[in-house]
Image (cartoon, grey):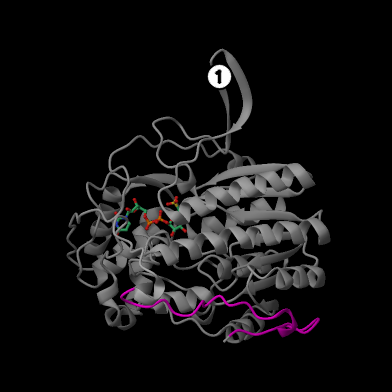
Amino acid sequence: MKVLITGIDGYTGWPLALHLLGRGHEVVGIDNFVTRRRVKEVGSWSATPIGTFPRRQSAVEELLGKSIAFHRGDVTNYAFVHRVLELERPDAVVHLGEQRSAPYSMIDVHHAVRTQTENISGTINLLYAMRDLVPESHLVKMGTMGEYGTPNIDIAEGFFDVEWRGRTDAHLPFPRQAGSWYHWSKVHDSGNVLFATRVWGLRATDVMQGVVYGIRTPEMVDDRLLTRFDFDEVWGTALNRFVVEALLGLPITPYGKGGQTRGYIALEDSMQSLRLSVENPVGRGEYRVVNQFDAAYSVNQLAEITRDVAREFSIEARIEHVPNPRVESEDHYYHPLHEKLPAMGYRRTRELTEVVRELFRDLRKYRRRLEQKRSVVLPATDWRKGTSRPAELAPTPMPALSTAPPTPTALPEGSLAHGP
Ligand code: USQ
């Protein structure tokens, strides 16, 4: 299959490209490198020193004997999206090219608006271009388990049957109650993708993915093939950050009581899941929702596992509950269903503790890079305090819109643009 990955330069986009190539698929990528710039904006960098995109492409050619076609550009630019789809005509589009950080979206009004306008408009652009150019193609859209929030009932896979005031309806969307502007952008996306499948008969899978952890996949046979690894308070996620905190001698930081429970999945198994969704497309007009995670853990459990594994590396880590910068339930019921992926053949391959060991082993190599950025690891973004001041009055002025799209003519027909 020919698969277009938007956000191919990212934490999951890059390993997905390697994984699909290894399974004999043809891969085309889009990226505007905005994550690289935004991680810099918060004073951080990837723990793994990732090369420029042309270097990544060369490493793939040299080490795997395969090639990745690439178009630099922004999915919020409709002319760009239209042009790439017209040129490439993919069988499937995996849409990962969105702003993916909840804390980033909570910094202030500008980051909130940016997150929602970019995420929602990028998805609508893809939907229109797919309708007009590749209506048979299958959209695999990255959503998030965080769309559902933490209701006091089991969480369905997208839809459930409801009985209310004596009447029933089958297959109603499960309620969404997200916990950040970012997570709400995914809720709005889900509604838009569902709508497009109904009115235009498109095919779509909406992936409700849990928190991803880990640093490598089997295809990363050389350091030049590693993916990025974020650990700062804005771009890093819970378990990955806990390992870095332990390595740097910082406290491991469950927020508040630490009973916040989420679904988690290892990077490698996330790749398996995305591939299965691509290889098992739905029919025309069908909108499938899959809950993509392996097991649920509270942040307290993750903190304890990290502390225990740290001991195996002679590191005495301490757990320190810090005031919760977020507004979220810290003690709640959590039981989401996840049956559709196993029905497609999914099998968990990585145990969490084993991946935590791998993280300690791998990250020790990049300790100096972690040390240099230790000041951005501990939590700072507060859900209640994001400023609403106009950009020019904000304490740290917003950099010029880093997603400024290239003009349509910046992509010569048939050419492969290159990253920085
Ligand atoms: N948390 C801590 N201590 C920390 C960091 C996080 O207790 O040092 C807690 C948070 O308060 C939250 C939980 O850990 O309750 C997860 O937070 P996170 O930062 O790991 O993940 P989150 O902000 O939810 O977002 C991440 C990805 C996002 C993806 C989402 C899946 O950044 O792209 O959509 O995980 S999910 O969480 O299922 O919505």
* Quadrant in which residue 53 is drawn: bottom right
Q: Is residue 66 visible?
A: no
Quarter of the render that holds ligand 1 = bottom left
- The N terminus, quarter of image: bottom right
- The location of residue 192, given as percent across then percent down, is 64, 49
List x then y, in percent, for residue 294.
47, 47
Bounds of the magenta span?
A: 394-419
Task: Name the foreground residue: 341 vs 53.
Answer: 53
Q: Indicate yes or no whether the magenta region holds residue 262.
A: no
Q: Quick one: label 1, few (<14), some, or many (20+) residues within 10 Å?
A: few
Looking at the image, residue 338 sits to the left or right of residue 41; the answer is right
Q: Amino acid at mark 1?
A: Glu
Horizontal and vertical percent position of residue 91 = 78, 60
Q: Position of residue 276 (x, y in %)?
A: 65, 52
The residue closer to the viewer here, 172 or 294, is 172
Question: Which quadrant would residue 395 be assigned to in this image?
Answer: bottom left
Q: Is residue 119 above or below residue 168?
A: below
The residue that disc 1 covers is: 163
When the figure is inspected, residue 93 is found, relative to residue 34, above or below; the finding is above
Left or right, 6 with respect to 86, comes to left
Q: Quadrant of the C terminus?
A: bottom right
Helix, strand or loop under label 1: strand
Q: Residue drawn at (65%, 60%), measured in percent from left and top?
A: 94
Magenta segment, prevailing SS (helix, strand or loop): loop
Question: Which residue is drawn at the image coordinates 28% and 39% (left, top)?
Answer: 331
Q: Residue furthest top?
A: 166
